[in-house]
Amino acid sequence: MTRILMVCLGNICRSPLAEGILQSKTDSNSVFVDSAGTAGFHVGNPPDKRSIDIAKKYGIDISNQKCRKFSKSDFNKFDCIYVMDYSNYENVIALTEHDIQKQKVKLLLTEGTSNNHEVPDPYYGGIQGFDNAFRLIDNACDNIAHKLTKDES
Ligand code: 4NP
């Protein structure tokens, strides 16, 4: 079982999309995907309605997800921790205690085809930002799913 954690700030906009998108492209018998936020503002809440709506537009249901805060114990529970932007990266790296943990933390879009390695935070903007986030995350998750499938065979 490969265990992958998607992380953003609030765990209500970008990382819930990343969780749902990667789950939709992988086999739950061999890949476990979860998400968390470095901040605890929305713990226990479902994803932002705009994220639920944009995921639904592309055929993915993320409405049952519940926000949780990233915890140091996640470094042991997951093989790979993908963050959405540099600020998330700094927040997670600040919690690491040794190099093995640091090496697990990567910007999600380093797996994508774009030279831009940040998924911009769509929280304070309109639905267009959520569509943009979906497309960027989807592109990176295609490549991750492809790699994981190759590893299995
Ligand atoms: P996310 O977006 O990190 O993609 O979930 C945000 C959600 C909430 C807030 C900021 C960003 N907030 O300030 O409440």
Image (cartoon, grey):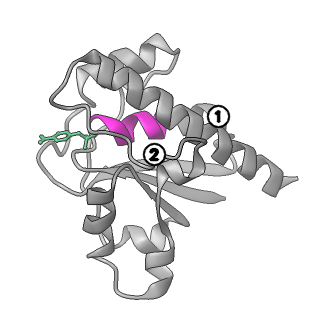
Residue 116's disc number = 2
Q: Quadrant of residue 47?
A: top left
Q: Which SS class for mark 2?
A: loop
Q: Residue at label 1?
A: 25
Q: Quadrant of residue 13?
A: top left
| Amino acid at dot 1 | Lys
Residue 23 visible in the snapshot: no
Tell me the crowding category of disc 1: few under 14, some 14 to 19, or many 20 or more residues within 10 angstroms, Cα based. Answer: some
Residue that sits furthest to the right in the current view: 153
Relative to 89, does residue 45 appear above or below in the rendering? above
Circle 2: residue type: Asn
Place of residue 15 in the rendered image (x, y in percent of width and height, measured from the top left): 37, 42
Which disc number belongs to residue 11?
Answer: none
- Which range of residues does the magenta coloring cover? 13-20
Residue under the image location 63 percent in, 50 percent down? 31
What x and y, as percent, mark residue 142? 65, 37
Badge 1 marks a residue whose secondary structure is: helix
Q: Position of residue 29 (x, y in %)?
A: 68, 46
Q: Residue furthest left?
A: 41
Side of 124 where 27 appears, left or right? right
Query: Where 113 sits versus 72, above or below?
Result: above
